[in-house]
Image (cartoon, helix red, strand yellow):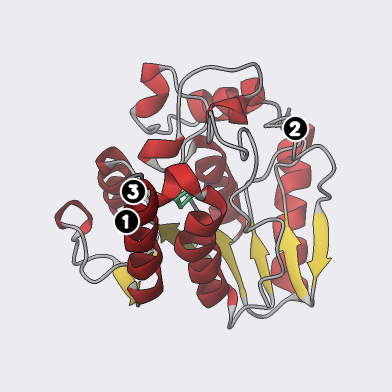
Amino acid sequence: MEEKIKHAQELVEYAITNYPRVAVACSFGKDSMVTVHLAKEVVPDIEVFAVMTIYKPHETYKYLKLLNAEWNLNTTVYLVAEHIPEELRDDELKIILLPPDEFIQKSLMIKAETGREIYEVDPDECCHLLKVEPTKAAVRSLDAWICGLRNTEGRTRADYREIEDKGGLIKINPILTFTEAEIWRYIATRGIKSHPWYALGYRSLGCQPCSQIGGILERDGRWQNTSKCGGECGIHTQLLK
Ligand code: SF4
């Protein structure tokens, strides 16, 4: 475990040393918090950004604000929305609102045609508009980003590498080989507060409608009963630049 932590911090050092413009992506799930925590031990004022959606649980907004303040993260939040949701409002956050027009138009069209929500009928498109496009905006001015991906999280994550080059954008995955148990051990030994949904039994947190308790692998609870079950939102599979 200590070897893995040391190696993870070496990867953060590698990112900082080799890429002038680098930031940590933080979803405020357990893996992100470990990544941010160990990155801050290397670079205390490392840049942090979060892509939020209007469908994130309110508990995620509250947890984000709490940890942003307690850890002095200066998080930049990217959000496709007309307004900042009441629960996310915080003078300590820099929130960049991105135009929701296309999302609203497609959601209304799907609702009119099917009577159902976009995330039920076309979660790929919903994720594309609410997660992938804002992530593109977040990484536009970066050379590299640091993520909390782990190989054992789900069926789609087994083959990721610690350092990836996707279209010239470098992604560093410092905790790639950490197991779920090691993540919880790190959190416990560092006294890190965790998102309240973990105490309810969730093992992987996303948007409220697309996160469930249950499954064998951590990400099996994501997008249950859709073609995307246990899969990816797209930010780690698509070109962002
Ligand atoms: S996780 Fe669900 S609600 Fe969130 S962007 Fe993707 S499909 Fe939409």
Asked which quadrant contains residue 157, the reply is top right
Decide which of 14, 59 is in the foreground and name it.
59
Q: Residues within 10 Å of mark 1 (few under 14, many from 20)?
A: few
The answer to whether mark 3 is within 8 Å of ligand 1 is: yes
**Marks 1 and 2: in contact by CB < 8 Å?**
no
Name the mark nearer the viewer: 2 or 1.
1
> Residue most toward the front?
113
Q: Which residue is mark 3?
A: 55
> Residue most toward the left?
86
Q: Residues within 10 Å of mark 3 (few under 14, many from 20)?
A: few
Q: Calculate the distance from the C-alpha at mark 2 to the C-alpha at mark 1.
A: 34 Å
For badge 2, the amino acid type reads Arg
Whether residue 45 can be seen here: no
Asked which quadrant contains residue 139, the reply is bottom right
Total marks placed: 3
Decide which of 51, 125 is in the foreground and name it.
125
For badge 1, the amino acid type reads Ala
Q: Which residue is mark 2?
A: 155
Label whose residue precedes the other's in the sequence (3 or 1): 3
Q: Regarding mark 3 in the picture, which secondary structure is present there? A: loop
Whether residue 59 can be seen here: yes
Q: Which residue is mark 1?
A: 112
Q: In the visual, does 201 lie left or right of 42?
A: left
For badge 3, the amino acid type reads Tyr
Asked which quadrant contains residue 86, the reply is bottom left
Q: Residues within 10 Å of mark 2 (few under 14, many from 20)?
A: some
Instruction: From the top left corner, tell me how far across and down residue 143 is, in percent.
Output: 69, 78
Which residue is drawn at the image coordinates 37% and 51% (left, top)?
A: 71
Q: In the visual, does 133 lie left or right of 88?
A: right
